[in-house]
Amino acid sequence: MNRQPTHPGIILNEMYLKDLGISQEAFSKKIGVSFRSVNQLINAKRGVSVEMALRLSKALGTTPQLWLNLQNQYDLFKAQALKSGAINLITPIKSKLAVRL
């Protein structure tokens, strides 16, 4: 199994907020969300929504895709780890449509 991707909230805290010397409270005010939202994100209790990705990218000079890709990688890894048994029971469907895709 591959290494688990880092939650985007941890990346936000370690690579941005700490580096910029900005508190969670100040950052939450800057991006117009509650302290709780930022705190839960940083503590990996909440994921990055599309709206949050837009806010983060605007404030930090990144792209929304960066934050959404980080979240998708994290979510996909977690889902594969938790559901691998059930997923492995699924057999592929052979169809003309599947070949064209």
Image (spheres, helix red, strand yellow):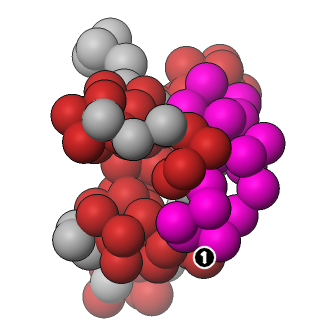
- Along the line of sight, the residue nearer the viewer: 67 or 5: 67
Q: Specify the principal SS of the magenta part.
A: helix
- Along the line of sight, the residue nearer the viewer: 33 or 99: 33
Q: Badge 1 is on which residue?
A: 51
- Along the line of sight, the residue nearer the viewer: 36 or 3: 36
Q: Residue at x 28, y 14 (%)?
A: 3
Is 1 part of what is drawn in magenta? no
Q: From this viewpoint, is residue 90 visible?
A: no
Q: Position of residue 65 (x, y in %)?
A: 32, 71
Is 36 part of what is drawn in magenta? yes
The answer to whether residue 88 is above or below residue 22 is above
Q: Residue at x 45, y 87 (%)?
A: 97
Q: Residue at x 43, y 65 (%)?
A: 56
The three-letter amino acid code for the residue at tag 1 is Glu
In the picture, residue 89 is in which quadrant?
A: top right
Q: Position of residue 32 (x, y in %)?
A: 65, 71
Q: Position of residue 57 (x, y in %)?
A: 34, 71
The answer to whether residue 55 is above or below residue 45 is below
Magenta segment boundaries in residue numbering: 28-45
